[in-house]
Amino acid sequence: KVFWAEEKWVLPGLVDIHVHLRDPGQEWKEDIETGTKAALYGGVLRVACMPNTVPPNDTPEITSYILKKAEEKGYVKVYPIGCITKGQKGEELTEFGRLKEAGIVAVSDDGKWVANSEVMKRALLYAKQFNLAVISHCEDPTLSQGGQINEGFFSAKLGLKGIPWSAEVAAVVRDLLLAKETGQPVHLAHLSCKEVIPFLRWAKEEDIPFTAETCPHYFSLTEKEVEGYNTLAKVNPPLRKEEDVLAIKEALKEGLIQVIASDHAPHSVLEKEIEFSLAPPGMIGLQTLLPLSLNLVKEGWLNPLKLTECLITNPAKVINVEPPSLKPGKKAEFIVFDPNKTYVLGPDIIQSKSKNTPFLNKELKGITVLAVIGEKIWELNWAV
Ligand code: DOR
């Protein structure tokens, strides 16, 4: 069969290392089948899934469950991430070696429990023994406690407790110092604010081993989205200001942030329909990852090659896996993306079980039209 790719981009599949698949335990939000289907439709052919499941991924049994289900029901390759500490308590470290044997590619404290400094230091040293990536959630909870949105004008206007930028910067600086001290690289997840950037520049100058990540919502949206108590714009870290959006784009251009990930965080309609302060933070992002990231090329921040590094090769490097590639002799693992297709992101286009995105029913440009993995070929979004 011939597929015409005229005026389209042919790319190796994207690698998204920040995805919440919610399976096991919260399958009303998402499961491995629907989450990986959303990934496929987003052109993401590999996902690493965060450990804040129920129960959390802190044992080899949970890791094996995820891998087995992904093998049976998954549309794309899944790499589980293990918890740093047992039972989401932030105290006793999980058994990194046994988890690695079961198949994890990294450990993380992403989600509601955050490692304190002492725990993070031990985790870095322990991870070094097993050559495991450490992904830090980058939040000092003693500074962000109870915060709902960015601290400042809107938190005052809406009467919601704010999350200050210092909560992110304090954790990032700590992680960079610990990476320097231990010699173990740290991956800084979902960076959102301008104040963090000078510290990344300093760390680069100091040759500190780190990688840094941001998500499309941090370079596409501002805190204004929360007006009217819009729970779809509630996310952690929160959406920040125009100047932060600009600083994140500049950091991508300067190479201080090397990874773009979705932080796909599904929550059901009911959970997002309640009062703002009770609604869980997070937004889905697998299907908007590439269209929104493409704006960085259109606006001149990144050239197409740099963009593919941020979405494919750099994230693969963080979790130490070989990225999909178009090189001859490699297994086919590529997508065809139509950068010019304009469409409305209606609920029927979203393959995820949850529809919680501020881009719901908004116009987007760019869509994955074909995905090829080995002998499997999917023609996608035929209904658009
Ligand atoms: O907004 C968020 N949602 N941030 C996180 O770090 C966790 C995530 C979730 O699991 O819902």
Image (cartoon, rainbow, N blue to C red):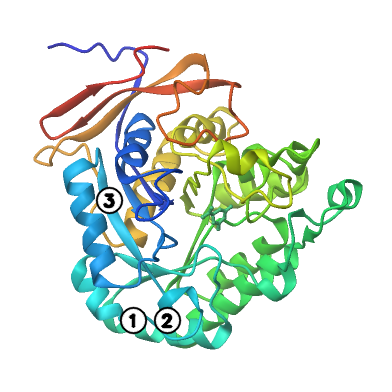
Give the Cα distance between marks 2 and 1: 6 Å
Q: Which residue is mark 2?
A: 124
Q: Is residue 150 above or below residue 117?
A: above
Comes first in the chain, label 1 or label 3: 3
Question: In the rendered structure, which amino acid carries the disc numbered 1?
Answer: Lys
Could you tell me which residue is drawn at 21 percent across and 13 percent down?
Answer: 3
All told, the count of numbered labels is 3
| SS for dot 2 | helix
The reply, left or right, for residue 65 in relation to residue 28 is left
Give the Cα distance between marks 1 and 3: 23 Å
**Tag on residue 78?**
3
Q: Is residue 125 or residue 195 the one in the foreground? A: 125
Question: In the rendered structure, which amino acid carries the disc numbered 2?
Answer: Leu
Give the Cα distance between marks 3 and 2: 24 Å
| The N terminus: image quadrant | top left
Q: Is residue 218 or residue 62 the one in the foreground? A: 62
The reply, left or right, for residue 145 in relation to residue 52 is right
Whether the residues at callouts 2 and 1 have beta carbons within 8 Å, the answer is yes
| The C terminus: image quadrant | top left
